[in-house]
Image (cartoon, rainbow, N blue to C red):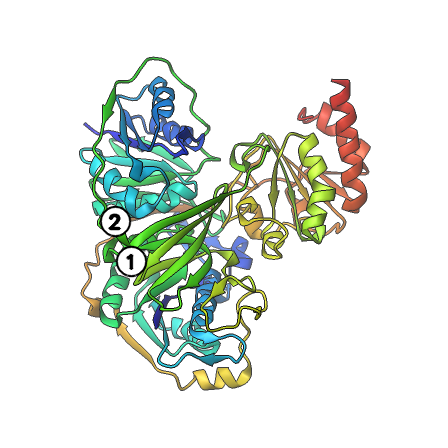
Amino acid sequence: MSKILVVAEVSAGKLKKTTHSAISFARLAGMPFDVLVIGHGVGAAVEELRAFGAGAVKVADDARFAHYVGEVFAPTVSAAASGYSVVAVTASSFGKDLAPRVAARLGAGFASDIAGVEASGGVLSYKRPMYAGNALATMQVTTATQVVSARQSEFEAAAPSGGASPVEAVAAVDAPLAGRVEFVSFDEVKSARPELAEAKVVVSGGRSLKSAEGFKTVLEPLVDVMGAAMGASRAAVDAGYVPNDLQVGQTGKVVAPKLYIAVGISGAIQHIAGMKNSKVIVAINKDPEAPIFQLADYGLVADLYKAVPELTEAVKKIRAEG
Amino acid sequence: MKILVPLKRTADPDNANKIKIGAGGAKIETTGLEPKANPFDEYAVEASLRLLENGQTKARIAGDKLTIVSFGPKEAATNIRQALAMGGDDGLLFHADDESLDGDLVARALAKVVEQQKPDLVVLGKQAVDGDSNQVGQILAELLQWPSATFAMSIELSADKKTAIVGREVDGGVIKLKLTLPAVISVDLRIVAPKSVVNHVTPATFAYPEGARFTPLPMIIKAKTKPIVEAPIASLGVDAALKSKYVSFALPPARKGGVKVKDVAELVQKLRTEAKVL
């Protein structure tokens, strides 16, 4: 019987929302699935995951898994994958690092960052965006075991379906490379804002904001009054205004919020790849020829230093009125 | 120290919206798009050069070497040559059609090249901008059983060159890993920031210009005489069977542009009453 193993993402013992997209993939693939939780002190995450209709929630809880290190996780995940036809994970930075390693260990084919799945006659076909989303490929994996990473923005977070899946312990497998790679530190960027890939509203800034200070003083008030996540174009990241994990685009995050506001972003191909599936797109740019206007639902040709504070005030007023 | 950088020839990513789909969705046509080195691989070349030189004097550390390897059509020699003009020492080109390759086969072929070349580091781009898979570095590391780091935004090589501390830019922050060489490092955008690479030879006060270096004419001329060894990929003796197959290709549904609003007041009104998102 074909079966899927979903690998959950846990950070400091807490279940990450990315996991729900991989579960959603498993449901769409139409096969029974189990979930593997690998980490340390993951009891609460396991409890939470029992309510999603998994055949079992498998748990590898070990001090060695306190921090994610691919070389340390991959042997245990690969061993746990025995007997499954598909191993699925969400294509977050965790999933992108782990999935190909597991594929290599299993000698399995890998479908990376997929945007859709279709099951027909027992065969899974995957949709994958390529060339910065300018082509959509249909591909199949031809090995007996397949490894898949699912794009979070394309697989809506699964909701609990009730029930209480049984919990099974999985033994941690020794990692031969553990002595040659050492976790040093995790400098977490603490933010009260929602995560980019999960936010309902995203406000992104481009190079026109001119500095880190520009992001802080002009963009952030709008981000916060909207309760939005903050994003940025690659140009703004390249210029060092904001960290790379805020980058929206082909090589950054792919987002599909209800509302995407692009501020001072011209709309380079690689940025569009990361946001074109947003439900409503607003663009504010002083260049009327900027390509972003070709896909924006609402375009405002204006100086962002005037328009953004104005918009911030207007939204503030609406919020105050309730 | 010896570094190997794999480099992929890709269609100009800045014009990726001009690709076409062949009859019946059989293939992606990139005719008319200028073939360029994958930008992330160029960053890998830049990061490697910064590991191998004194940035201030531009002098290569004695005995150090940078080899560029590519799998692709004969024309990929041009792209290898560009990396040699940046400062690479020699190149290897294994002939193959793009259709006959996938990330898994490239990683298996690279593992063979590593066995032959015995580098201390393989530095590569985190993903190629055509396939957008982000997989070769991770698969290669597993095949070689070498430690590795993906999404690298900083590399600090220890003075004895036995270890490297690599900063990985991941969701929510930066993870630092200490790798014992030999190792695989796949690089992200910020590896070419002015002080991202530390080798304890370049003075700490020295800052590189942002980005991959430009190649002055004398370097381009010099690169013409640097060796590029070419061979069919079959000479590496890897199983040519692919683990995945592409069934068809299509253009994504186009998104239509909407309206221009005249001011913030109109924008707010439309977002409230029409789009209902405020």
Q: What kind of element bears circle 1?
A: helix
Name which residue lies at 38% across and 58% down: B185
Give whichever of B43, A61 is nearer the camera. Answer: A61
- Callout 1: residue from which chain? B
Q: CA distance from mark 2 to mark 1?
A: 9 Å
Seen in the picture, residue B58 relative to A15 is either above or below; the reply is below
Seen in the picture, residue B102 relative to A3 is either above or below; the reply is below
Quadrant in the rendering for residue A79: top left
The crowd level at tag 2 (other Cα within 10 Å; few <14, some 14-19, many 20+) is many
Indicate the position of residue A307 as horizontal and vertical percent values.
79, 40
Q: Which residue is mark 1?
A: B107
Left/right placement of residue B24 relative to residue B254 reads left
Residue B260 appears anywhere in the view? yes
Taking the view exactly as shown, the residue that stands out farthest to the top is A163
Asked whether disc 2 touches disc 1, contact meaning CB atoms under 8 Å apart, the reply is yes
Task: Tell me which amino acid carries mark 2.
Answer: Ala
Name which residue lies at 44% across and 82% down: B223
Task: Tell me which amino acid carries mark 1.
Answer: Ala
Indicate the position of residue B140 as horizontal and vertical percent values.
29, 56
Seen in the picture, residue A152 relative to B193 is either above or below; the reply is above
Image quadrant containing the C terminus of chain B: top right
Quadrant in the rendering for residue A173: top left
Name which residue lies at 73% across and 43% down: A217
Name which residue lies at 70% across and 44% down: A216
Residue at mark 2 shares a chain with residue at mark 1: no
Q: Which residue is mark 2?
A: A104
Left/right placement of residue B155 relative to residue A200 reads left
Quadrant in the rendering for residue A301: top right
Image quadrant containing the N terminus of chain B: bottom left
Q: What kind of element bears circle 2?
A: helix
Indicate the position of residue A223 as horizontal and vertical percent values.
67, 35
